[in-house]
Image: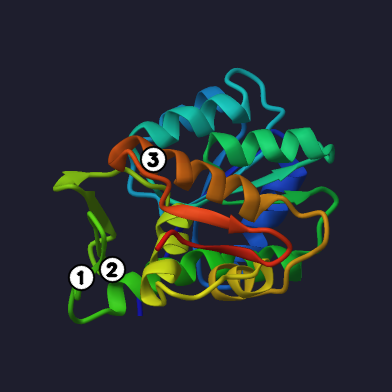
Amino acid sequence: MRTYKILVVEDDEAINNLIKSYLEEEGYIIYQAFSGTEAKFYLKEEIDLFILDLMLPGLSGEEIIRQLRINKDSPILVLSGKSALDDKVQALDLGADDYMVKPFEKRELLARIKVLLRRISLQEERPVDESLTYKSIVLKPKSMEVFVGGQALSLTQTEFLILYEFLKDPKAVFSRDRLYDSIWGYDYQEGDNAITVHISHLRQKLRQASGQDIIITVWGVGYKLAQ
């Protein structure tokens, strides 16, 4: 069984050490950074998951997310004292996969980590890369590649998984509950804008690549692929 590598970027030494100790007990390999500047040294390393505070000395957490998303699609879990909706949306806009507000429960942190890492394990467990196609889109589940009109399309893990759910059932209408359950593994919470932000980014990328609106809104219900 594979052992996952996690980088904890948190300037509060007590919180950083608490997370490290707890996750090591759960069998993860933990690296620590106590500033944004220090975290930058890990951006090219083989890290499976980033746990990231936003208010950091040196580079901000937001800037770390920007730099990570230039060439990495590893999941990013923001763990921040910033609780305003605008801060959450901005982090998701930049490419974070999930967002937790301090103070936090260790069990919830572990549950969210398992959800994010489950995507990696599912990718590695697929024995055959059976492509899914829709219009000009070709999606390869095992290699996590997407092509539109023959050209590679860069997606985050969450964007990829959303598109994967749509392409598996191309005629279905997807409610927020269904998407949250399939991708995050828990029920939709009223007021949680994560799905809206991720779908907005995915729509924009697909529109730019194909010249068409691929995902449309079914008002009061959810989303579906344009037929």
The residue under label 1 is: 131
Q: Is mark 1 on a helix, strand or loop?
A: loop
Residue 50 spot, x, y in % from top left? 52, 48
* Residue at the (57%, 20%) spot, across then down: 59
**Is residue 147 or residue 65 the one in the foreground?**
147
Q: Which of marks 3 and 1 is nearer the N terminus?
A: 1
Q: Is residue 220 visible?
A: yes
Residue 112 spot, x, y in % from top left? 64, 65
* The residue positioned farthest toward the front in the image shown: 227
Q: Residues within 10 Å of mark 1 (few under 14, many from 20)?
A: some
Viewer-side label of 1, 2: 1
Q: How far apart are marks 3 and 1 (CA)?
A: 21 Å
Location of the C terminus by quadrant is: bottom left
The residue under label 3 is: 207
Q: Which amino acid does label 2 sit on?
A: Pro
Residue 215 spot, x, y in % from top left? 47, 54
Residue 177 spot, x, y in % from top left? 68, 72
Picture layout, residue 183 above or below residue 192: below
* Residue at the (28%, 60%) spot, across then down: 144
Q: Can residue 12 be seen in this view?
A: no
Q: How far apart are marks 2 and 3 (CA)?
A: 21 Å
In which image quadrant can residue 187 be found? bottom right
Picture layout, residue 78 above or below residue 141: above
Dots 1, 2 in contact, CB < 8 A: yes
The residue under label 2 is: 141
Q: Which amino acid does label 1 sit on?
A: Ser
